[in-house]
Image (cartoon, rainbow, N blue to C red):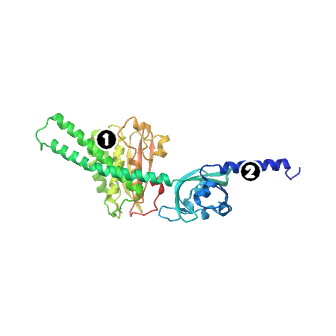
Amino acid sequence: MNSRQSPTLKAASAETRAETDALFNSIGDGAIATDEFGRITRVNPVALQILGYKASELVGEWFPRKVIAMSEEGQPINLIDRPITKAFLTGKTVFQKMFYQRKNGQPVPVSISVSPILLKGRPLGAIEVFRDITLEEEIDRMKSDFISLAAHQLRTPLSSIKTYSHMLQDGYMGDITAEQKRSLTTIIGAADRMNELMSMLLNITRIESGTIALNSKQVDIYRLTEDVMREVGLLAAERGVHMQLEKQGKTPTGLRTDSLLLKEIITNLVTNAIKYTPPKGEVIISVRGRRNDVLVSVSDNGWGIPKYAQDQVFSKFFRANNITKRETTGTGLGLYMVKGLLEELGGKIWFITEEGQGTTFFCSIPRKITTSPVNINKTM
């Protein structure tokens, strides 16, 4: 058989190549293709426009060295943390948000999707598609600023509502009937819930804007947890849910963290567990000191989290269907905020769950606050 291609085969090959190039160049977002060693083989016009390079300056270059990925603080991101590396290592499509450095040195926020090119399980290269999200980031910042301003402004009239309602209820303005007293209790309860919501919104805007001020000091984790249990005790009693604190081992010492943020984290987890547990259920808070951190877990025997929803639990405004049918007052912001606050402390959160059986959330709190690069995923 003649090893040389016939003119017809060559023409067909050239036509196929031209069609492939046309398809690649017509992608509406930036697109970069690499070989198995990470060398750039193709770049479409949108990618060149976003990055400010010419094709001749990129093709043939090692992608991670030529296209620099950065944190919001301008620090280069490690090769192992880049989406193209994760795609090669896992063989799966990876989505991530970060900053790329343009040729002129300016950072540009991008949303990235990288898919490995596989043949019989072996990576032959990768295709990365990314888009400039500068406008989206600005809109998000404006929304956060508006929410923060609105929450601050609403606190003043809300404070007056609570103050005068308490005065009426306590008889400072004359005797009231039992029915009027019940109505005032409802008003005060609604005002408290609104105040909690505004505090949550303010915390979220601080997390997303990176303006949370941390106050590190020695914390007695047992005492803090007991304080939380006392404060949410009425809610647990109203719902017929039993709470229990399990102290595993000696009192953890040497925990220096922000006590207010930590209390907010544990309060939200315990409150969630109470709300999503049926009457006569049980919520167990466990605290255990480890070498480098303190592990806090909150377990319930409630409704659990369906499998389809488990990867969305920490998303903003998300609530699973099995919860919305039973509990209509939630916002879907609590766990999103808890995750953000824990990241501010350098901690982590994860969970195990079974639908209909209950859920356990685990929090690891470093013994000292660890400062990590700003995660652009929190702001977009």
Q: Nearer the viewer, residue 253 or 123?
A: 123
The amino acid at mark 1 is Val
Instruction: Write the residue at 38% across / 35% down.
Output: 326
User: Quick check: marks 1 and 2 in contact, CB under 8 Å?
Assistant: no
Name the secondary structure under disc 2.
helix
Q: Is residue 266 visible?
A: no
Percent of width and height locating residue 37: 66, 60
Percent of width and height locating residue 94: 57, 52
Q: Earlier in the sequence, mark 1 or mark 2?
A: 2
Percent of width and height locating residue 335: 40, 48
Q: Is residue 360 above or below residue 260?
A: above
Image quadrant assignment for residue 173: top left
The amino acid at mark 2 is Arg
Q: Is residue 353 above or below residue 108?
A: above
Q: Which mark is drawn over residue 241?
A: 1
Structural crowding at the residue carrying mark 2, measured as other residues with C-alpha within 10 Å and reported as few (<14), some (14–19) or many (≥20): few
Percent of width and height locating residue 38: 65, 60
Q: Which mark is drawn over residue 17?
A: 2
